[in-house]
Structure formats: structure tokens, C-alpha cells
Amino acid sequence: MLHGDEHKRRRAVLHKHMAKGNVERFLPQMCAEIRAVGAKLARRGSFDPHSYTAALALRTICIAVFGTQVISAGDEEALVQAVGMIEDDLADDMFRVVPVGPIGWLRRKRRRTFAKFAMSTVVERLRDKARTSSALKDFEILGLSDQDLHDEILTLLLAGHHTTGTTAAWVLYHMAADPALMDAIAAEADECLDDSGELRADAVRRAELSATLVREVCRLYPGAWWFSREVMQPVTIGGRELKRGTSLLICPWQLQRDPRYWESPDKFLMTRRYTTDAYVPFGAGPRACAGMGVAMLELQLLALEMAAAYRFTGVAPNPAPWPKASVTLIPPPMQIEIELRQARPRQPQGFEEVLELPVLRRAGARGGRTPALPVMNK
């Protein structure tokens, strides 16, 4: 809601810490978080993607903005649940026709009070743990009050994890719906590895297949499927005169499925170009999402790491299920079956007759992917 120089000052801090080029220095830590979630899912055998991606996105945004190991598992859960409470109420407010009544209003007030308290508690803990090079310290240098600091951190957490977490669930869905695409992304991940088995930032920048997957998912399921703008001075748009103070609603969901700009707009296609002005998953102009670089990188790393280490074997609903129109486009409950992707290890020279065993494969070294653990076939 800020304007002028104050808006520019605070946004400069966000750009400093959330620009894709700056976030790439945390690539190993971000990938480690994704691998930890992948290992948990593999032990379960099947999973509902949206149940895990929100917390993963929260950890990633904390790494990018506040540093590593600043949020505990308990705080993650508390924040995700608090956001869910508020989002459910906001979504109900947007689409409700009949008023909730005094009892319903009282229940909502209690839920929101609890949710705000939980979020404030998490914010204070983050302030205590944030590193000296974090966005928090830069905001403090600007001389912000305690309340302004609190609001900035909370906005980063809410906007940074919830939209990306929802979009991440759709990324996993589309890999499950197209096994051949997931295999191709696994091959692309192999080309992005260094000798230690970590994804290289320069190679990820050139990984066009996984980047296209992310762009197409953001077209079909933009994290912010609508947003608003206020007219600051009289203007004529489309032949209609708009007065200062008029509220405008922009709907990326509609623009990005408009047949005037997209061929077969409701289909998931990996052959599209995204140069049209009708592609605005992160908004546009000076108010565009400051975290788009973090979000795009996180989603691409998720696709590369998960495809490299696992196969989704369950049949995902096809065509894609219809999302729940809330603050974000929430996927309905679904189950994706998961198994380890196997590869043959390199054979040492002079040991051609060594028994070839399949190995567990993870986002590690090329070929066998360290650590390569032999698995005996029965």
C-alpha cells in the first residue's frame, strides 16, 4: 500500500535479496530441502502434493531472505495452518451470498485472532534468528519501526510461500500426468550436475525443458489468479473513462486462457512462447511480484531434483482436476505414487565382470548418483 520514495526504499531491499541471481548462491541449501522432502515422500510410497509443497516453499523463502536454519518444523506447521485458516475465511467472504450470521462471525473472529497470534509468534522468532546479511537487517538499517518490520516479514512469509507452494503442487501433478516429460527432465538434470553431484547454477539457467514446464504451469495456474490496482489519475482504457480511486481487477487466470492470445488455451503444451502481454503470472510493472525470481528458481529446482531421483508411477487424474478458487488456485486432494528412479553405476576399468546391481538414485553424482546404495534383486 506504500507509494513514492518509501515504496522504492523497501522494494530495493526485496530486490537485493530476492533477485534470481542473488538467490542462486543458496542453490545447494534449497536443493537439500527439496531432497529431504523427496526422501520423506518416497518412504510413504504415495502423497498428496499440496500437503507438502507449502511447507517446502516456506523453508525456501526463509533461506533466500533470512538465511539457513532460521525456522523450525513447529513454526512451519503453525504458520501454514494459520495461513490456511485465514485463506478459508477470505475465500468464503469473496464468494458468499448469504451472511454468516453472529455465531459464524464470532467463530471467524476467534480463528483470525488465533491465526494472527501464531503468525506474530513465528515472526518474532525469525527476527531473533535472522543472520546479519538477511533482508531483516537491511530493513532495520532503513530505520523501520518494530510494527513495520513485523509487517514486512509477515508479508514476505505469506506472499512468498503460499502462492509458490500451491503452484509447486501443480508442477508435481503435471510431471505425474506425463511420465515421458518427467524422464526427459531427469535427463536434463543429469546435464546440470557438477562432480560433487550438485546442480550447477549456470547449467540450471540453460535448462530450458524444466523452465518451460514451470512457465506453462504458471500460465495455467497463476499463483495470484487475480489482483487489484487503483487508478491514481484519470485515464481512458478501452474507451471507458476511469476516475481516480477506481479499483481495477486484473485476472491472469482469464488472460492466460484467452483464445485470442493462446492456441488451445486450456491444454498443457510445452511448445508455447511466453512473449505476449497476456502472460502475467507475477503481475507487471513497478508493482510486479518482487519474489518472482525466487519462485521460478524454486519451482525449477523442484522439477529437476524430483525427476532426477524419483518416478511418479501412479496414474494422476487426466484431464487435470479443477482447482479450488480461493486466494490461490488450490488443487483438490489427489494421490501420486512415487518410487526411486534406478540407474546402473559406472563400472571400474578392469572389473568388467563385476555383478551389475541397480542403485538408488538421487540428486548427486552423474550416473550412479552418490551415495549409490546397492539393492539386491530377489
Image (tube, rainbow, N blue to C red):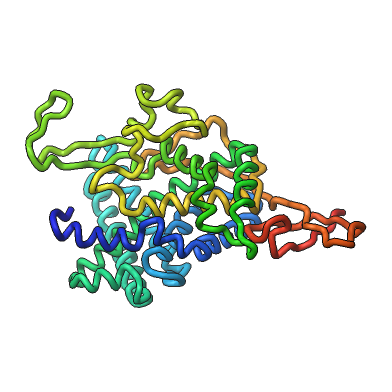
Q: Considering only vertical position in the picture, is 278 above or below 245?
A: above
Task: Using the rendered view, name the quadrant where residue 369 is placed.
Answer: bottom right
| 259 to the left or right of 272 | left
Residue at 31% x, 72% y is 124
Indicate the quadrant where residue 355 lies: bottom right
* Image quadrant containing the C terminus: bottom right
Residue at the image point whose x is 30% and y is 35% from the top: 251
Between residue 217 and residue 91, name the one nearer to us: 217
Return the x and y of residue 68 as percentages of the image width and height.
45, 70
Front residue (pair 100, 324): 324
- In the displayed structure, 180 sits above or below 371; it is above
- For residue 355, above or below residue 47: below
- Which residue is nearer to you in this view: 142 or 60? 142
Image-based side of 3 in relation to 276, left or right? left
The residue closer to the viewer here, 169 or 103, is: 169
Which residue is found at the position 23% from the left and 73% from the top?
141
Q: Position of residue 177 (x, y in %)?
A: 59, 37
**Image spot of residue 81 (x, y percent):** 40, 58
Total numbered labels: 0
Q: Quadrant of residue 174?
A: top right
Residue 165, x across and y down, in percent: 44, 51
The answer to whether 364 appears left or right of 24 in the picture is right
Q: Residue furthest right?
A: 353
